[in-house]
Amino acid sequence: MNQEEFDLLKKLGRVSAPPNFEENVLTCLSHHKRQMKARYLRLSLASAFSAVVVLLVVINIFIFPQKGPLRFITMKKEIPTVVQPQRKCAAREVIPIVEPVNYKNEIETLSEKSTTIYILEQVSEETCSEINY
Amino acid sequence: MNMDEQELVSRIQQGDEMAFAQIVRSYKDKIVNYLWQLTGDYQKAVELSQETFIRVYFKSRKYKPVAPFSSWIYAIASNLAKTEMKRSRKMKTVPLDNVQPNIMPREHFPNNESNADLAQELRKALNSLHPRYRVPVILKDVEGFSQEEIAQMLRKPLGTIKARISRGRNYLKKELVKSSIKTKSFKKRKENESGRI
């Protein structure tokens, strides 16, 4: 290709920017800036939140160790060697339930005699006093 | 880079929008034209130009005054255009000949009819040229940058740029010869048909 043809390439035809190009760029710039600000705000909020979480974890572990899992380790050490029968029961999975029962009303329905109140007491040390479910 | 531009860039680095507007004003036509030559689509060229200037603003702190400021802007525009062309090459399914341009730019073709035809053929050939060659050819022959400047802009060795320009020109030459043969044969056929009638 000779030089003349390349001169033609130079004269190929030029276009110019549309008349509102400058305003569009500036509008786009302000939009981008706003977006960046919002992103920065979101990022800083997220980092602040995560910092607070980390701080709480650190405080929980190092500053208040008794409230952490270490407490149970120390509790295990305090368990006596001789295990009492009641404690044996407690060792099993027993859910103690206290039910307020109005015996007076129940007895009234059965007989019209004077009401007797039965108080149930634990008589043996061996058996478990709690109700098992 | 002249003193005014350097001052403007340092003001942009401090976040001065007035300085940025001045840079946009002085480069908008050049960049839009350059991107139009690269992409062949005026609307896309305008969008890419906007993106170029936005990047200029946000990346202005990365600019080092070792190279001219114009080279830096053109480098950003080239990179954006290359990415866009890659994307459009992947998505392209319709031949370019069938596509009608959606917005016609204010292009000034030469007055002569044959020159206008040649320019049209040249445009077709340019659009079919691979971006790897198209970018340096346009930077050299349309925008008038030196080969050293182009090498610096595209971060390629000088030899590579020279080879790409040469190959690009050869490709354009071949395409033009092909199209001129086609046009001649088409004209002959038309003449023959009209002679028969």
Image (tube, rainbow, N blue to C red):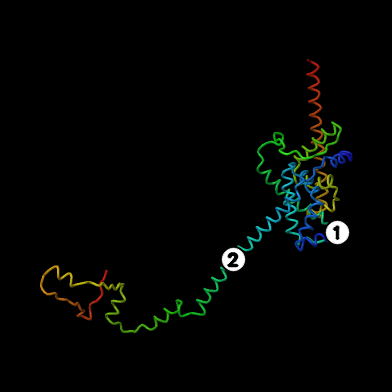
Q: Is residue A117 left or right of residue B136?
A: left
The lab-note entry on whether marks 2 and 1 share a chain reads no
Q: Is residue A106 left or right of residue B73?
A: left
Q: Quadrant of residue B54?
A: bottom right
- Residue A73 coordinates in the image, percent (x, y): 42, 79
Q: Quadrant of residue A49?
A: bottom right
- Residue B78, above or below B3: above
Is the C terminus of chain A in the top left, top right, bottom left or bottom right quadrant?
bottom left
Label 2 secondary element = helix
Foreground of the two, B187 or B33? B33
Instruction: Give the amino acid type for the residue marked by disc 2 in the picture.
Output: Leu
Q: Residue at x 65, y 42 (%)?
A: B91
- Residue B113, above or below B81: above
Q: Could you tell me which chain the residue with mark 2 belongs to?
A: A
Foreground of the two, A50 or B137? A50
Per the image, the residue denoted by label 2 is: A45
Is the N terminus of chain A in the top left, top right, bottom left or bottom right quadrant?
top right
Per the image, the residue denoted by label 1 is: B4
- Residue A117, above or below B31: below
Mark 1 is surrounded, within 10 Å at the Cα level, by few (under 14), some (14 to 19) or many (20 or more) other residues, namely few
- Residue B142 coordinates in the image, percent (x, y): 83, 44
Q: Residue at x 78, y 38 (%)?
A: B123
